[in-house]
Image (cartoon, rainbow, N blue to C red):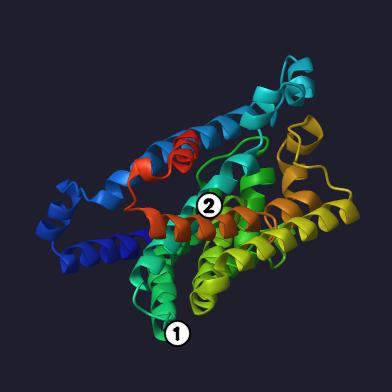
């Protein structure tokens, strides 16, 4: 079966690496100057993960029948609840962390080199896809086969049965990470829009970092110009399509989740390549700055240190 093959693959990979070596990696706590300077990111990841959980919890309160109709109608009127219930605001930070760590690692690797070799770029892309795709394949196959047989109920066919049909039709797009581009309104596993977008930003960042390294003298100007173009393009897109700044947590969108997944704004603003491109590009710039200043003394830049701790 599907899961037997996947389990055998995982066990083989673990055996190939060596249980002893993996156990040593698991229990070893590395401590270097760079790791200590980046330790705060672990806390940021925790808080952002909590925000994502809070966001989905808030949405679950209005995605089904409720006794108090006033609550979902007024959810967006409170600023604190608006932040917790706006998933894109929480997820955008993960794209920034992703490109920040990638940028810091690559620029550190390229410290004595002029450019990033194309062979290395292709190897890094292959390595990421090789690690992610087996798990994605198993989940897609599970949704396209067994999932619809595991339960029943009044809404079971509307949601699970429909998901089964979508994965039968478009599951292949998830395996090549273009499910947020191709036939998005019939997307298999809509929650994987983030994974597709993160993979696309990962590939973009590799080539963009290679370009920046070749023109390192003008790096900050290129980053600033790129961010300006993204801001203008996002404004034009939102103005042309009459989008709001974010998808408000109102019942018209989230009741039954059907309207959200069929929302033009969700697919063209939140899940599109340009939708979260600004934090991804910002992460590249911050990663470069950190790579060049991670060994500086905190007392050397008092103002910058205060801003860093504030962030």
Residue 106 visible in the picture: yes
- Give above or below for 220 relative to 307: below
- 157 above or below 107? above
Q: Residue at the location (65% across, 31% down)? A: 83
Q: How many marks can you see?
A: 2
Q: Which residue occupies 36% across, 59% down? A: 3
Residue 207: x %, y % from top left: 53, 75
* Disc marking residue 118: 1
Give x and y (percent) for residue 29.
18, 46
* Image position of 193 with respect to 260: above or below: below
- The residue wearing badge 2 is 96
Q: Secondary structure at mark 2?
A: helix
Closer-to-camera residue (244/129): 244
Q: Secondary structure at mark 1?
A: helix
The residue at 29%/49% (across/down) is 35
Task: Determine which quarter of the picture holds residue 183.
Answer: bottom right
Q: Position of residue 253 (x, y in %)?
A: 78, 38
Visible residue check, residue 176: no
Task: Judge left or right: residue 274 versus residue 279.
Answer: right
Q: Nearer the viewer, residue 92 or 164?
A: 92
Relative horizontal placement of residue 219, taking residue 101 as reference (left or right): right
């Amino acid at each position: 079966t599907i899961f037997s093959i996947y389990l055998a693959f995982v066990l083989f990979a673990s055996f190939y690496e060596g249980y002893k070596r993996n156990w040593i990696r698991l229990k070893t706590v590395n401590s270097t100057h760079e790791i200590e300077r980046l330790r705060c990111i672990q806390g940021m990841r925790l808080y952002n993960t909590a925000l994502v959980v809070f966001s989905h919890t808030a949405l679950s309160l209005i995605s089904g029948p409720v006794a108090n109709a006033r609550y979902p109608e007024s959810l967006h009127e409170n600023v604190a609840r608006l932040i917790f219930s706006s998933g894109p605001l929480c997820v955008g930070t993960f794209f920034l962390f992703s490109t920040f760590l990638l940028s810091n690692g690559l620029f550190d690797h390229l410290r004595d080199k002029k450019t990033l070799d194309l062979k290395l770029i292709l190897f890094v892309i292959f390595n990421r896809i090789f690690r992610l795709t087996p798990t994605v394949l198993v989940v897609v196959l599970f949704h396209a086969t067994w999932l619809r047989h595991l339960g029943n109920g009044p809404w079971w066919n509307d949601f699970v049965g429909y998901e089964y049909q979508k994965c039968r039709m478009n599951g292949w797009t998830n395996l090549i990470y273009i499910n947020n581009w191709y036939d998005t309104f019939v997307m298999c596993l809509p929650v994987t829009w983030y994974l597709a977008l993160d993979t696309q930003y990962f590939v973009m960042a590799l080539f963009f970092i290679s370009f920046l390294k070749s023109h390192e003298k003008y790096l900050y100007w290129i980053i600033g110009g790129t961010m300006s173009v993204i801001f203008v393009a996002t404004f034009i897109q939102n103005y042309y399509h009459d989008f709001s700044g974010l998808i408000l947590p109102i019942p018209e969108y989230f009741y039954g989740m059907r309207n959200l997944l069929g929302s033009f704004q969700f697919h063209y603003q939140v899940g599109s390549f340009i939708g979260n491109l600004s934090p991804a590009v910002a992460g590249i710039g911050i990663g470069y700055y950190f790579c060049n200043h991670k060994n500086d003394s905190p007392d050397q830049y008092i103002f910058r240190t205060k801003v860093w701790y504030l962030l």
